[in-house]
Amino acid sequence: MNPIRCVEVSKKFRRVQALDRLNLEVPEGAVYALIGANGAGKTTAIKTMMNILEPDAGLIEIAGKDSRRLRGPDFQTIGYVSENQKLPEWMTVDYLMRYLKPFYPTWDDTAAATLIRKFGLPGDRKLSQLSRGMKMKAALASSLACHPRLVVLDEPFSGLDPLVRDEFIEGLIESAEGTTILISSHDLAEIESFASHAGYLEQGRMRFSEEMSSLSARFREVEVTLGEPTDLPRNWPAEWLQPQTSPAVIRFIDTQFDERAITDRVRALFPRMMELNARAMPLREIFVTLAKEERKAA
Amino acid sequence: MKQALHIFAKDVRRLWPLIVLVLADFTLFAFTAPSDGLGQFLLTVLCWTLTALAVLEDAPAQESPFWLTRPYNRGSLLAAKTVFVLAFVFLPLLIAGIVNELRASVDVLANAGTLLLLGIGRGAFLILPGLAVGAVTRTMKQFAGMIGALMIGFVACDNYAAVHWVARVDPTYSTDPNLILFPSGLVALAVIALQYIRRNTNLSAALIVFMVIATSLVARLDAITRWTVNTTNGRFDPTGIRITLDKSASTQESGNCFSTPLKVEGLPRGAALRAHGRQEMRLASRLLGTQEGRHGSFTVNDRDGYLQAVCLGGFGPEMLASLIVSVNYEVVTVVPIAKFPVRPGLQALSGAGECDMVTQFPPHLQCRIVEPAIGTVGTQLEYNGLSSHSEERIVPGLSLSPILLVNFDGPAPRFQPRPWFEEAMKHPEARFILQTERVIGYVHADLSYSGIVFPPTQPDRKVQ
């Protein structure tokens, strides 16, 4: 059973369709990166998963349970950290930990102490006196100290400086080993280093959802050198995005890259092809490509 | 329960300065029972603020509150808030009430039921608005704004209903506080349950707004008042009461006001009429003046009755050739609590408490009444077959034994003491009577009178 499963989930805010028949599955033990432009529906998707919002249609299952039926005890195994979450800012870091401990049967004092130390959190300081990055680390520490089976992070890196971000990720990876993690973020370079899966959300719909290895294998920036200047043919394949031409060179992004077939397909369009280079793309470039296409279509 | 107590302890830790302030105010109330509106207003504000802050600590209305994605049991959360308000508002209120009663020599055990009932009523007023409105708001600022808006809305709707609606349809309307408090309390409880179970803030907020508008309008409906009266006094039929102008008696002048004598027939023994609802005086083509609501300034009984009419300054006698008077009264049963002589100083009321005549009579009295009194307590001055009912204001405070402020001058400057008061004051047999009053019905009469002369040419009725 997958820890998170969304089937045809829709959510509308007045006239805005925030989620449009969203389908998503996060496998056990995966680190799933939910990416998408601003307003794509990432936060809404996460909030409906956590039963903060109710979906208008469709089904969300969290560890096999309908998200609408998620109640307090179900959160004993779920850690949730969000940039929008209102923390009890009057509490000190130590008191926050002491206060939360009785709520979790699996609370681990040692893990809590380790996380506080690792994150450099001042135990006697009120949350209101902490910087934004420190607050996020305190929230993460309080979510990981109970060894949750599922960790959901909604834009945890936004506004954090690179050092804090690194510490945050390190803490997450070390403390949540084997835990299923769903993380929505714009910080794609960071996510790429530890995400095992990625899903791209566009206007409330899941454009793709797959393993990182297959994603990076599927996207290639292709550069074709021709014998002479040539215009783009009319029958340009739809999966080859952002074609650019300069005299005798054509560049495009292949979203369905197949190493064995690409040469033949290019040659069919450009018989005078002299050279073909295909470069792997980082997640950030893939995201930007898709975002640009989305904007162009809009 | 363990979780509820854990959350409760957290709230105490967070809100202890305000808790101390509220407890101090309750202590002050217990030992001084301030009768001024400011003291009671301050206590109400403190209690509402404390309750709202406790709710907002784990606000159900926020979109991403911290507690929502933590293993909070919603029942425990509600229980924690309930324990909090019981511990720091309801219990202190009860204790302060008991201390008040003990200080007034009330037998607390014998009146435990009444005391508890009063405590629940007052506690509901001090707790439920804070809980319900707190449950649908996200911040203290929002809470204060909503409470203010609801109060303004209530007063506006209430006034609108009184002036433009109910008064035209049926002038015998009244506002019974129970008709507002009881359904409001039920709606508040429903909102609290809805918010903690379903977190449907829009619906809950709409319910509160609807409740405020509905109660302000419904409370004015005479039909419901009648229903209440019939329910509690099913055997009483007010249609047997007849009110006519007593043409054999003279009109009375007092300053620039004048009163017309009324003849009342069919009034049950021990009952009296009290001006209540719309009272109107008009000439054939011109409205001279009106009064609305519970004037309470004058009671007609079977021995002596005068309608306290509107002031007519500036009108000449020729304009009063044909006077039409439309009156509404409530029928009240009157049970005497104590009789005591008219003299300044502290008067023991033989078991009913004590009464302090603050100044030389007339006009002021201040009484602490020990006997349990739910309803109105009135004061009557009785002398030589004449009687006059007083203006009264009961200050409930926290006490079962209300303080009764009596002012025979009345709150309206145009009301003057009866001319025979001065005479009565000099006679040792003149008596004040403290009495409980209970409304058992309503009567209405349209009267017309010809030949009134103003100022009256005949002398006032003289004290024999």
Image (cartoon, coloured by chain):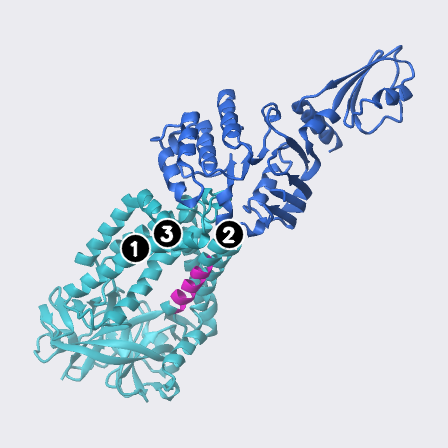
Residue highlighted by disc 3: B2
For the point 41% across and 71% down, the residue is: B287
Quarter of the image containing the C terminus of chain B?
bottom left
The chain letter for the residue carrying disc 1 is B
Q: Nearer the viewer, mark 1 or mark 3?
A: 3
Residue highlighted by disc 2: B201
For the point 43% across and 78% down, the residue is: B227
Q: Main secondary structure of the magenta part?
A: helix
Q: Is residue B9 visible?
A: yes
**Residue A60 belongs to the span the image colors magenta:** no
The chain whose colour is cyan is B
The span shown in magenta is B179-191
Q: Mark 1 packing: few (<14 Cα in 10 Å), some, or many (20+)?
A: few
Chain A color in figure: blue
Q: Is residue B391 placed above or below A9 in the rendered structure?
A: below
What kind of element bears circle 2? helix
* Upstream in sequence: badge 2 or badge 1: 1
The amino acid pointed to by label 3 is Lys
Measured in 3D between alpha carbons, the distance from the residue under mark 1 to the one under mark 3, in whole angstroms, is 16 Å
Quarter of the image containing the N terminus of chain B?
bottom left
Between residues B351 and B429, which one lies in front from this camera angle?
B351
Q: Is residue A49 left or right of residue B79?
A: right
Q: Position of residue B188 (x, y in %)?
A: 43, 60
Pointers 3 and 2 within a single chain: yes
Pointers 1 and 3 within a single chain: yes
The chain letter for the residue carrying disc 3 is B
Residue highlighted by disc 1: B87
